[in-house]
Amino acid sequence: MAAQFGRRLRKGAATTAVAAVAVAALSASQAPGVNDHGRQTAADATPSPEASASDGSATGNSPYYTDLPPLKSPNPSPSTGPGPGGTGATEAGIPATVLDAYKKAETALREAKPGCNLPWQLLAAIGRVESGQARGGRVDADGTTIKKILGPQLDGNGFALIKDTDDGAYDGNSSYDQAVGPMQFIPSTWAWAGRDGNGDGKKDPNNIYDAALAAGHYLCRNNWDLSQQGDLDRAILSYNNSREYLNLVMRWLEFYRKGTHEVPDGAGTLPDNRSDDGASPTPTIPGATTPAGSTPRPGPKPEKPATPQKPGGGGTTTPKPPTTPPGTPSTPPATTPTPTDTVDHLEDAGTAKLTAMAGDTFGKRISTRAETEAGKAVAKVRVRFTIVGDTDTTFTGGESVATVATNSSGVAVAPALQAGEKTGAVTVRATVVGRTVPGLDYKATVTERAADTLARTGDAALTCAPGGEFANQVEVKATYNGAVADGVAATATLITSADDATANDKGPYFKDADGKTVRTLTGLKTDAKGLLKLPKLYADDTTGTFLLRITTAGGATLTVELTVAAAETSSPSASASPSA
């Protein structure tokens, strides 16, 4: 019945409101408050207010397909070939290359971000809603769509207003952005979220492998765990900030979880209804396809000329004279500037000094304020923070770009920075999304891992006979502010004296890989527990007390005493006497 119900929403007649009601009705009919995984369903989940606060949306909240999955879930089908007949079998089929891209993206994310728990069925649900699985799998052997799939231009005419950010490179539109490709990324999002999923060295939003991997990373940012319903809701809403969209994607996700199968490329089912059906016509771009690859919708029919009313009808047959002289150009309606249009510049909003040790999270975060020319704060403006240059420092979650909306005070606070292992200066650039104003650069510094304390893990005396081998190896533990100091560089030297840190030329020594005598070891590092165990020590023929000094980055120093002495020999007893 669901398939029939979905088709009744004829193209050109189904409005967004009707689609929303249909999705809600299906949600209510297919599941109670909790699904068979024991989780709260999307229909009962209230989106968190921070769900869309970070990135706006991947698609710029572009239109999407509203076709509903069948009420009857598909039966598990063979992994190849068309599915068997019956309700739900056709809708459950996913084109082979598209399905392969989803599964490869899941595998890649399982390794890159195992805590995200991304299911490939979520990518399939979004791909179905965004482009009908790349228009039924119309892709070439490399996974690139045969024709570009473009959403409507986001000119504020019934859609969001997002002015051009890519000079038409992806969407062919140098005036406004359009969602691009099978996963419908807008160019400004693809600029930082794009990935190379098929290893050809390019990041192409029109390639299903690239787009699926990019969508996976996009859904896995912010340390979201998609096995948790709250984070799953946030991730889906960040893709398209609509409650109806969330409900619809959840329905397809559950549908695909209960069974799907592979169909040949180009043989997938095509959706019929879109969320903007019945909206005003979208201006076409020369050479571009119609929005989201759909069939062009006819514009409004011209009005019929007024029919003169019959006498006594109470009307008039005399047309009113024009209010303006013939040939006078009409004045276009005034447009209200968006908050982004009013931004003149960015200002630092009190960011403290940004310093962190390699591998640590920065304790301070970057704060940027969007202001008008008069210095007035501007709220609801998207500020993009980008880590530039050769560095392995990222934002928490592993991304090098984060987009944050300014709050009521006009301030956007970037996610915390996670220092990598490369030390030195790091630059983070703040820019306004959708507006060309000078960027604002922030400098951060990554210092090497350090320790401030070293201590031996044992207290056994370190002694050896001349020419022998020390029985115990030296092991120390490094800490920094009382916490384990892992990965800290260290040096061990057998020094001349307490006042002379040069290497001794006699006494105990280490051996290198060739068995040669060395009295200084460099390139040492503490392990994950902050422990450092030195190699075995040997002694030459010189007896006496010697010193081993261990130093680390950060200034921690420990001096250990070593003793080389001949073994004691027992003397005859003084009480012994000759026998009688």
Image: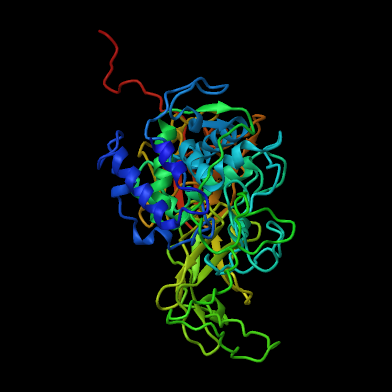
From the viewer's perspective, tell me whether residue 35 is left or right of residue 288: left
Classify the position of the N terminus by image quarter: top left
Question: Is 301 or 174 nearer to us in this picture?
Answer: 301
Spot the residue most to the right: 287
Spot the residue most to the top: 580
Question: Is 180 or 111 nearer to us in this picture?
Answer: 180
| Res. 307 image quadrant | bottom right
Q: Do we see residue 477 in this rendering?
A: no
Percent of width and height locating residue 464: 47, 32
Q: How many marks?
A: 0
At 58% from the left edge and 51% from the top edge, which residue is drawn?
A: 184
At 53% from the left edge and 60% from the top edge, which residue is drawn?
A: 60
**In the picture shown, does residue 260 fall above or below 408?**
above
Percent of width and height locating residue 352: 46, 73
From the viewer's perspective, tell me whether residue 128 is left or right of residue 235: right
Classify the position of the C terminus by image quarter: top left
| Res. 322 image quadrant | bottom right
Spot the residue most to the front: 311
**In the picture shown, does residue 350 fall above or below 93?**
below
Percent of width and height locating residue 208: 62, 41
At 67% from the left edge and 29% from the top edge, which residue is drawn?
A: 514
Question: Is 308 or 243 nearer to us in this picture?
Answer: 308
Q: Do we see residue 353 in this rendering?
A: yes
